[in-house]
Amino acid sequence: MSKTIGERLRELRTEQGLTLEELATRCGLLKQSISYYELDRGTDKISVLQTLAKGLGCTIFDIIDEPLGREDAMCIHAPKCPFYNKKFEKTEKR
């Protein structure tokens, strides 16, 4: 079962032995903000996740607990998107 973003943030932070204050210093955020995110009260922007990922030395995908390249994943726009299943012909370089 997937974990919440807050659970993953806390897990990644504690795996590295970091306190809230240490991670806050690395990220340039308030420790109260990081606590807020770890309690799943929300992250307001992707830029915050990028900042936290840099501070933790990981990627956003590590935080959101979504592995890349899942075979069962499908874009919600696939039925409407003309490019989703389109096969493109190889073109020669000129």
Image: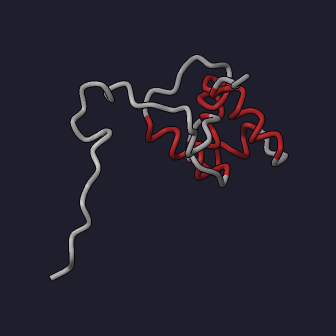
Side of 23 relative to 74 (left or right)? right
Side of 88 relative to 94 (left or right)? right
Q: Is residue 36 above or below residue 47?
A: above
Q: Which one is in front, 32 or 49? A: 49
Please name the residue shown 59% across and 29% down the image.
33
Image position, residue 82 (x, y; %):
21, 36
Seen as rendered, the residue at the extreme top is 41
Please name the residue shown 55% across and 32% down the image.
72
Q: Which one is in front, 51 or 90? A: 90
Please name the residue shown 66% across and 26% down the image.
6
Side of 60 relative to 86 (left or right)? right
Please name the residue shown 55% across and 45% down the image.
69
Q: Quadrant of the N terminus?
A: top right
Q: Which one is in front, 21 or 86? A: 86
Image position, residue 11 (x, y; %):
78, 35
Side of 52 relative to 76 (left or right)? right
